[in-house]
Image: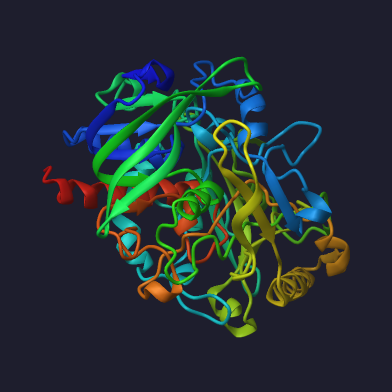
Amino acid sequence: MLRNGKDIANGAVIETQVCIVGSGPAGITAAWELQKAGVKVTLIEGGPDSPKGALDPTWPDKSVLYAGKADGQFAESEPDFLIRPYNRAGGPWERERMFGGTSAHWGGQSRPLDPIDFEARPGFPGWPIDRAELDPYYAKAAQLCLLHGDDFSPQAWAEILGAEVPELTGFDTTIYQYLGKNYLNFALRTFDGVTIADTDVDVIVNATLLEIEQRQGRVCGLRVASMDGAAGASKKATEFTIKADMVVLACGAVENARQLLLSDVGNDHDQVGRYFMCHPLSNGPVLSASGAYLTDAQTRLMAGQTLSGNRAVPWQDANGVRVSGRFSPTADEQKRLGIGSCWFWANYGQYYFEMAPNPDSRVALADTVDPVFGQRQTHITWLLSDRDEATYTQTTALFKAAVEELGGDVYYQPWPAVKEGLTVNGHHIGTTRMSADPKEGVVDADLKVHGLDNLYVAGSSVFPSTGISNPTFTIITLSIRLAEHLRGRVGAP
């Protein structure tokens, strides 16, 4: 069921078992899994319904309600990060305010995090869970996303493609799958033949969370408001309350932190908003490899190609799933050098890496307020560290040495030239990180906010470290796991 918040009477009270705030992959996945078990779910989204998946309808209200201040590294490359696309010529936008969230521009690149990503290592805190605990949920996520199975090993894919696995000293060959067909936008895609709006989930668009009301260690209500008026000139229309047994924030790493800060919830140890991370991406090519350091069969694996006769052609399955390969430093090299991960992609010249957690890279509240609801806006500061520089210099040197062993060569630009052009690349990670100790994070291993009995957070904001894999597949995985936990809490099978 899909309805508009402005059609809900002023002062109304909606009662539900689970209320999910945010309709991106995290929120919709959790909603789908819960309703399958018979749980009563209300899913609210601040932005409008966009039945054709268009991004344009989100622009005017997003530029008003998501505005604020972005500084630090943003001052160099993306001062308009909070409201604008980082590619001014078009292309990916950083954040969305619409039904479906950022899945509306997701590229579908999927791969689990590596076991080392969950381990404590120099500069990286580790997770309170390990990779083995997520493996069964990764398998369920692969099935939900209609991937070509849950085996991402290069050996398995070399057999499927009739290709060979490259061997570079100090590097693993890693495989990514890409979602096919029309499964990217979670608001529009079908689950068992129906969209989320066609299920029993009560989907309310144009429903902005204003306040998380809590008392005696529990959330007792959510104040929610709708807007009315022409796009870009909206005003507050109605205000209503949602009372839920369990509440899940699934608004993205920036807004999850802002909502907790606005309500002064979960921040007893000044951890909310800290450790904002991403996968920094260089602005254009900054390195190049020369020489035939890969065989034709190895090149085909990296490109996701198979042979048709004597011709290399892109492989895809019946659902349109495709694959490609990357080179990433091994766990042993990451530990030995005290660096994060990265990937290199044959002759691809951009650089993409794992940012180290930094407590001063953070989301806070700005002194300014939005003109619709009068709430404090976002002040986000993105800061890199010396460890990020070490990741770049060490991994590029390692890659150069490995390629030279095979008869090739690698050129790469110095760090200062690369740093000034780095962009966030659409992956917003951290700000409500998972921790066993409340003094070191915001949520526990079950994604429950420390100190509150019924408030949970979903999405990549809970990641203690970024790893190198694109985050959405792990976001979906964690939401499946969270739904299983919440079913137990509300007494559903």
Q: Nearer the viewer, residue 466 or 5?
A: 5
Q: Nearer the viewer, residue 415 or 233?
A: 233
Number of labels in the image equals 0
Scheme of image coloration: rainbow
Residue drawn 72% across and 74% down? Answer: 398
Regarding residue 416, the answer to whether it shows in the image is yes
Q: Is residue 102 left or right of residue 447?
A: right
Q: Classify 34 as above or below 416.
A: above
Regarding residue 138, the answer to whether it shows in the image is no
Q: Classify 14 as above or below 407.
A: above
Residue drawn 72% across and 33% down? Answer: 91
Q: Nearer the viewer, residue 15 or 2?
A: 15
* Quadrant including the C terminus: top left
Indicate the quadrant where residue 83 lies. Answer: top right
Residue 278, percent across and down? 62, 57
Residue 420, percent across and down? 84, 59
Residue 172, percent across and down? 57, 66
Residue 191, percent across and down? 33, 27
Q: Classify 150 as above or below 226.
A: below
Indicate the quadrant where residue 53 lies. Answer: top right
Residue drawn 69% across and 54% down? Answer: 345
Indicate the quadrant where residue 193 lies. Answer: top left
* Quadrant including the N terminus: top left
Q: Classify 220 as above or below 383.
A: above
Q: Is residue 319 left or right of residue 399?
A: left
Q: Is residue 478 left or right of residue 14?
A: right
